[in-house]
Image (cartoon, rainbow, N blue to C red):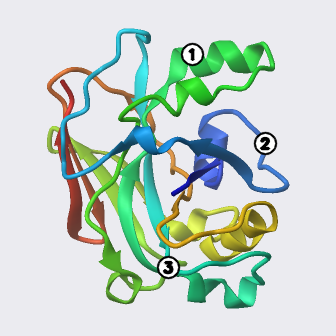
Amino acid sequence: MKIICIGMNYRRHAIEMGRPYPSEPVVFMKPDSSLLKKNKPFFLPGFSNDIHYELEVVVKISRLGKSISPKFASRYYDEITAGIDITARDIQTRLSKSMLPWEISKGFDGSAPIGEFIPVSSAGDIRNLDFRLEINELIVQQGNTSDMIFGVDELISYISQYFTLKTGDLIFTGTPSGVGPLKRHDHLVAYIGDKSLLDFMIK
């Protein structure tokens, strides 16, 4: 099972981070050991002093596919959820400045909490989904998939040129603006539409 992540895929987030819109999807991977399921708590690691949340819509691949055309991409997923791409921002910044890979800032243990999966058909139009993250009952991130630079079907087509997609693979499709730091005792609840799908604590 692969966890495929997309960086800088929301226009407002690119502006927030002071970066130009990418000309093609920015792809990186997380190992399966980064998954955090069943609303288990996330424990702040000792190797970073600046751990950030990044709310994302996560798509689960439902069938084997390679070199998928965008017009057929919707056939390859039928469930979505909310996930958090937890990032060691200080490590990412340091490695990026040195033009080095920054997987360790994104792929460490527990850095990919995911919520309950729901059918795409019950969520609404994948191209126009509202989603949000609340921390301690305050909204810190909210977005709509219409702000994506590369939509879900386009992402699946692009990724499948390089990686064979298999049943159960996950795609973190990018984060909207509003990313920020986490601290101990924070309570995170993530929604797609008005449905709470992920609910966990920082320890």
Which comes before the other along the chain, label 3 or label 2? 2
Q: Using the rendered view, name the quadrant where residue 74 is placed.
A: bottom right
Percent across and percent down for residue 179 are: 45, 37
Residue 187 at x, y percent in the picture = 16, 37
What kind of element bears circle 3?
A: loop
In this picture, residue 50 sits left or right of residue 69? left
CA–CA distance between discs 2 and 1? Answer: 21 Å
Q: Amino acid at mark 3?
A: Ser
- Give the residue drawn at x 19%, y 48%: 39
Quadrant for the C terminus in the image: top left
Viewer-closest of 169 and 192: 169
Q: Measuring 35% from the left and 81% from the top, which residue is drawn there? A: 123
Q: Position of residue 164 (x, y in %)?
A: 70, 67
| Residue on which disc 3 sits | 62
* Secondary structure state at the residue bearing disc 2: loop
Circles 2 and 1: CB atoms closer than 8 Å:
no
Q: Classify residue 166 as left or right of residue 161.
A: left
Nearer to the camera, 76 or 128: 76
Residue 54 in view of the camera: no
- Residue bearing mark 1: 91
Q: Residues within 10 Å of mark 1 (few under 14, many from 20)?
A: some
**In contact (CB < 8 Å): disc 3 and disc 2:** no
Q: Residues within 10 Å of mark 3 (few under 14, many from 20)?
A: some
Question: What amino acid type should be assigned to the residue bearing mark 1?
Answer: Ile
Residue 50 seen anywhere in this rendered image of the structure = yes
Q: Earlier in the sequence, mark 1 or mark 3?
A: 3
> Which-is-in-front pick, marks 2 and 1?
1
Crowding at dot 2, Cα within 10 Å, few <14 / some 14-19 / many 20+, comes out as few
The amino acid marked with disc number 2 is Pro
Question: What residue would you read off at disc 2?
Answer: 20
Residue 13 horizontal side relative to residue 51, left or right:
right
Q: Secondary structure at mark 1?
A: helix
